[in-house]
Amino acid sequence: MRGAPTILHLDMDAFYASAEQAAKPSLRGKPVIVGGLGPRGVVATASYEARVFGVHSAMAMAQARRLCPNAAFLIPRFTLYRKVSDAVMTLLHTLSPLVEPLSLDEAFVDLEAGGTEPTIEAARAVAERLRADIKAVTGLTGSVGLAGSKMLAKIGSEQAKPDGLVVIEPGTERELLGPMSVRTLPGVGPATAETLRRAGIHTVAETREAGEAELVRLLGRAHGASLFLMAEGRDERPVVAERDAKSISVEDTFDVDLTDRTRVQLEIARLADRCVRRLREAGRSGRTVVIKVRRYDFSTLTRSETLRGPTDDPAVVREAAARLIDGVETTAGVRLLGVGVSGLADFTQEDLFAQAAQAAQAAQAAEAAEAGQAAQAAHEAVGDAGRPPGPERPEPVGEGAGEASEDVEKPRRWLPGSDVRHAEYGAGWVQGSGVGRVTVRFEEPWSPPGRVRTFPVDDPALQPADPLPLLRPDAEAEPEAEAEPEAEEAAGQDGGQPVTSRP
C-alpha cells in the first residue's frame, strides 16, 4: 500500500435518480426511485429524498412503494446514463492513463501514474478540480475518496457522500477502520460475516485482534490471510486500466410466470438479439452461447453450446439459444430468462455451418441445372426464403413481420419516465398511463417545471423520443419563467397508483 493518498475513487451520487432529477425539473428535491416497475421489480437507485424513507438499492420495488408511496417511480434510461458516464470517464482519463471503471457511475484512478505529485495538497487539488469539472460537464455531483489504497479510497468516497471529498491521510488507517463493521472490508459478504459473527467478530478492530491464524482457521488460508491484511489497512491491489469482460449477457424477470412454450421461445429470441447488440457495441464476438432459466420455484439452471468459432451473427446466437431452450422443461412456469455469450474474442469468423450449407446449396443448384431443371430450382429457392431458417441463416423478414402484426393488435405501452415528443407541445416525459390514457409532463432539463396533459394512448401526435442532454446545448440559458400550474394527477400505470410529483 502506498503512503501518499494518490488512489482516487469516484462515486456519482445516486446516479440514475440524480440524472432523472436533472432531466425533469418537476422532480428536483422530491423522492425519485428508478428500477423495474413490475410486481417483481427491484430498485436500481433511490434519490436521497427517497432514502430518508428507508428505500435503498436492490430493495424489492413493492416494498419501496410501501415505504415511499408518493415518490416518482421511473424506468431506467440507460441511453442517457451511458452518455453521462462516457463524459465522466473522459474527464477521469485526463487525470491518468490508469482508470479502472467499476460501473457506469464508479471508478478508481491512479493519480501518480498520471503525474500528480504524491502529496496530500496536490491530490486534493486534483480531486476538487475533478468534482467541479463533472458538475460543469454533466450538471451532476460525485463524491471522491483519496487514500493510499483502493479499499481506503472507496471507504473515503462513501464517507464523502453526497457531493463531498474525504482524504484519508497516511497513519490514520487503523484508527479509522477499527470501529467499522467487518462488512466494510472487501470480500466480506453475508456468509463470511455470519461465520465471523459466530466467532464473536463484528468489527474491523475485532478482526485484527483475532489474528491471522484464527482467521485462516475460520475462513481458509487465502481468504483468511487476505482479510487480515485488509483489517490492518493494507490493500496491495493495483488500479487496472482494462477490466476484460469474460462474457456479455442480458436477462429479464417477468411480472407473471411464463408457461406458454411459444412465448418462452419468443422471449429467448428477443434476448439473443439484445445480447448480440451489446456484443457488437463492445466490438467483440463469442464462441459459447449460454441460456439461463429460473423456474417458478426459484430453481435456476444454465445450458450452453460451444460453436466452432467466435461469432457476432444474431441468427447464429438466436438459433443456438433456441436449441438450448428446446431441451429445458418450462411449462411449470418460468420467472426469469437470460441469454449470454462467453469465450469472447476481438474478431469474428464466418459460421462453418453456414459455409457448409451454402456449399451444399450450390452443389444442388448445379446438379439441378445439369438436369435441365434450373427453373424449378429457382422456384424452390424462392420458396425456401419464406420457410423458417436453420441455425446458419437469419430470417429478419419473417421475425419482423410477426412483431409488426402483434404491435398492430396491441395499444402502445407508455412507461413512467420514458421520453416522448408531441407534435404540438414538444418534448416531455410520461408520468403514468392506464385505462387507455397516458399523462405527460412537458418540460426540458433547462426549463421550469412544465404543464401536465393527458392523451389517448394511441394519439398519433405523441411519439417516443430520444433523451435530451442534461445541460442546454447553447452556451447561455434563457431566464426561467414562472412555472405553469400543474394539471390533474397522472392515472396510475395499468390502473395502479398515480405516478405524480407532489410538493
Image: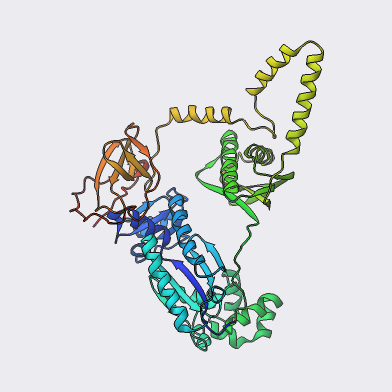
Q: How is the image coloured?
A: rainbow
The answer to which quarter of the image holds residue 224 is bottom right
Residue 173 percent across, percent down from the top left: 52, 85
What residue do we see at 49% from left, 76% from top?
155
What residue do we see at 31% from left, 45% from top?
428
Report whether residue 307 is seen.
Answer: no
Residue 146 percent across, percent down from the top left: 48, 77
Query: Residue 483 or 55: which is nearer the viewer?
Result: 483
Count all numbered tags in the image, as a single digit: 0
- Quadrant (top left/top right/bottom left/bottom right) for the C terminus: bottom left
**Image position of 495 (left or right of 224):** left
Residue 12 percent across, percent down from the top left: 43, 65
What residue do we see at 62% from left, 39% from top?
314
The answer to which quarter of the image holds residue 321 is top right
- Quadrant (top left/top right/bottom left/bottom right) for the N terminus: bottom right
- Looking at this view, name the residue that lies furthest to the top: 372
Query: Residue 131 or 18: which is nearer the viewer?
Result: 131
**Image position of 161 (left or right of 213):** left
Image vertical order of residue 395 relative to residue 465, above or below = above
Query: Residue 53 or 99: which is nearer the viewer?
Result: 99
Image vertical order of residue 333 relative to residue 243, above or below = above
Residue 18 percent across, percent down from the top left: 37, 60
Report whether residue 171 is seen.
Answer: yes
Image vertical order of residue 331 relative to residue 102, above or below = above
What residue do we see at 49% from left, 67% from top?
94
